[in-house]
Image (cartoon, helix red, strand yellow):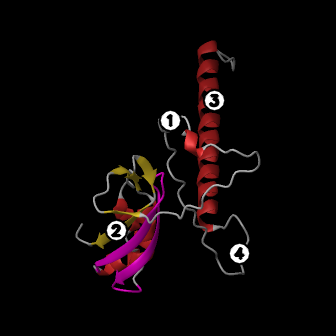
Amino acid sequence: MNDGVITTSEQAARSLRVVRLVSFCAAVGVAALVLFGIAALRYAPLWPPHDGPYVAVVSEMAPAPQAPRAPPPEQPRQPPRTDELQTESGPSIAPAVAPSEPVVITNPVWIERPRNPERFYPRQAFMRGVGGEVVLQCDVDTDGRMVCVVVSETPEGQGFGDAALRIAAGHVMRPATQNGAPARGRYRMVVPFSPAG
């Protein structure tokens, strides 16, 4: 007879039930706190309401880093001719050289072009299925970079001109040459926009 004395197996079973009950209650409590926290984040603002107008912050993409360019080969120096030597000491005056007219470029060789130019398509025009064309007049520097202005934009007021200028800014061409040296150039760029691609 036991006379109220708990044996070891009964004690172990009772302890196991207590541990399971406490573990279950703790798990339910943690789950309730997590669900309450998620609901609080979903339905309660984390910051006070804003009374002023909302301002959109837009940043432009930085241009891709460029690989260092090799310096142009040096031209061999030629000794001065004897008839050009100065006979007097004193400051020399260089003859005034008028800047040459830019070379007209008709078939450019592109060194760099923007990736995914369709990202520049004006959003509202694309959503309405409107296409267009922009003609740019670009001055090309001796490093091949272009500075452009809009000559014509069809249709006007749809944002195609600004988009074409952003596209042109991503282009770099091999510069024009004059007498074997890089020279300033002029290029007429036509930028078509078609919503069909």
Q: Position of residue 72 (x, y in %)?
A: 48, 39
**Sequence-earlier tag: 4 or 1:** 4
Distance between mark 3 and mark 1 Cα atoms:
87 Å
At horizontal 44% and vertical 58% (from top left) the residue drawn is 170
Q: Position of residue 195 (x, y in %)?
A: 27, 72
Kind of residue at badge 2: Met
**Sequence-earlier tag: 3 or 4:** 3
Determine the image quadrant of residue 94: bottom right
Q: Determine which of the numbered discs, if any, sits on residue 152 in the image.
A: none
**Sequence-earlier tag: 2 or 4:** 4
At horizontal 58% and vertical 45% (from top left) the residue drawn is 84
Q: How many marks?
A: 4
Looking at the image, residue 7 lies above or below residue 151: above
| Secondary structure type for disc 1 | loop
Instruction: Mark 2 vs mark 3: give the one in front.
Output: 2
Kind of residue at badge 1: Glu
Q: Provide the residue span drawn in magenta.
A: 130-157
Which residue position holds label 1? Answer: 74
Which residue position holds label 2? Answer: 189
| Secondary structure type for disc 4 | loop
**Sequence-earlier tag: 1 or 2:** 1
* Crowdedness near tag 4: few (<14), some (14–19) or many (≥20) residues, C-alpha within 10 Å: few
Which residue position holds label 4? Answer: 49
Q: Is residue 175 left or right of residue 56?
A: left
